[in-house]
Amino acid sequence: MTDVRVAGVGLTRFGDHPERTGRDLFGEAALRAFEDAAVDRADVEELNYGNFMGALAEHQGHQAPLMAEAAGVRCPATRYESACASAGVAVREAVRTVAAGDADVVLAGGMERMTNLPTDEVTEGLAIAADDLFEVRAGVTFPGAYALLANAYFDAYGGSREDLAHVASKNHANAVPNEYAQYRKEVSVDEAMDAPPVAEPLHLYDACPITDGASALVLVSEEYAADHDLDASVAVTGTGQGTDRMALGDREHLARTPAADDAAEAAYADAGIDADAVDVAEVHDCFTIAEVLALESLGLFEAGEGIAAAREGVTTADGDLPVNLSGGLKAKGHPVGATGGSQIAELTRLLRGDHPNSEHVPDAEVGVAHNAGGTVASAVVHVLEVAE
Amino acid sequence: MSDADASEDAAPPDREYGEWLDALADGDGFALVCPAGHGSLPPRRVCPECGSADLSRGALDETGTVETYSVVHVPSPGFADDAPYATAVVDFGPTRLTGVYREGGDAAPDPAVGDRVTVDAGERVTDGERLVVFRPADGETGSGIER
Ligand SMILES: [Zn+2]
């Protein structure tokens, strides 16, 4: 086993790029990642690429070879699909490949193109991450599924729409200085409360936007980084993944996300840390309630206590444990198949000290990234640490 | 193509789901139950919880309890004319079901956690597609938590 270093990260601006092809978006992210890494693209031994709905959005299957071309690499290339965790699983396999000594350099990330579709088609597209027979045909939409989780949470532990509005307001504030974010504007708690309902109790500002974008990471072995004198100070020290029953109604808990519990436990064990060591987190807040569930699965808060974290200022930028300093999916945007890679890119920048919000975590040594698919039937957790 | 293949092609899509919905419409709603008592929905070769291949049909409870719900305002295209509508997850004994909650007449759907409901097969307003429908159980009033 060898240590895995993040040699470089690349992102497109997240937002509306309805006229840009997926191959152009991923090509841009990969170009930036190679520039950041100062790694020769000829050394790339594998491409692990995440994408969810390219067959619907671009009528394009079999995207991995296309993205290898866009990145200018010629090596085994594979597309990974686990709904909103597509890039998370792609990165995880890259980490495992490098850690096992099977490759010294892997390019990993993902892309999603969404705004070229009408909103109702995006709604329909996202719903295919749920069980088609027993959920989608029963009227469950993507926001509707998280609304079911939210009401179950309120019933089990208490909490209110206003608690969730604090999560939205916090993440919008964090996105303001982030040059890659889709919505760089503040949203007050009152504005979030007054927004129209999407699926009660979730309203417009509880939901992430529809986003185009791509992410790319150059991951290398510690030995490769040393041999090439790379500036790769951040290591991926832990990776974990969990799976749950596909349909929400078949889960052990309706107000918790056991797949993410499993992913976190595995990632922490892999890194040899526990939750107390975490200084900063990027979590999968596709809806505000999802951030709450993530914090509890990561062991950063007890069950039932994550709901108050934003309102009480614990997870705000100047709190003890800043969460989603990038703006999160909520404000930075959620190009589904790119998100898992984007979270690790943002966490790397935060730990290196070159993120616009790094000033809020000047002494951070340990970061955790949580990426979820569907209603957390899939979950991936990574631990990043400052290695030098 | 053989005649056998032709008759396969003529079968409705998602056959086991269609048969399960037929049973629900006939008042014979069921789950597949393993010896350990885990319930699941068809088609199944094995219990998804424990892997047992010894599955038999177990009747759903006559009434179920709403465990969570949402009133959906932004629908997918298939539910365009149904919105706003309520979805709910309901415990029916051997398994939970997810479906649309409807009250009589033009009443806006207003379920609560803990409500007692019955289950039937109904139709989408938008296009007549069949779906799982919950209705308030006779003589029951909402006992759930109001908020
Ligand atoms: Zn069983």
Image: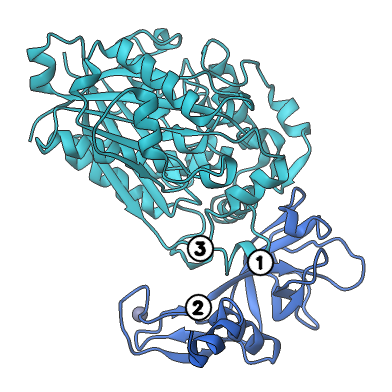
Which numbered dot is residue A138? 1
Sequence-wise, the earlier of marks 3 and 1 is 1
Q: Secondary structure at mark 2?
A: loop
Give left or right: position of B20 versus A67. Answer: right
- How far, Cα to Cα, is label 2 from label 1? 14 Å
Q: Residue at x 71, y 53 (%)?
A: B76
Q: Secondary structure at mark 1?
A: helix
Q: Residue at x 32, y 86 (%)?
A: B53
Up/down of A211 relative to B37, above or below: above
Q: Quadrant of the C terminus of chain A?
A: top left
Q: Which residue is mark 2?
A: B41
Same chain under badges 3 and 1? The reply is yes
Q: Position of residue A198 (x, y in %)?
A: 73, 44
Dot 3 and dot 1 residues touching (CB under 8 Å): no
Q: Position of residue A298 (x, y in %)?
A: 36, 40
Q: Quadrant of the N terminus of chain A?
A: top left
Q: Position of residue A299 (x, y in %)?
A: 35, 41
- How far, Cα to Cα, is label 3 from label 1? 11 Å
Question: Among the chains, which one is blue?
Answer: B
Which numbered dot is residue A247? 3
In this rendered view, identify the residue nearer to me: B100 or A112: A112
The residue positioned farthest toward the front in the image shown: B1
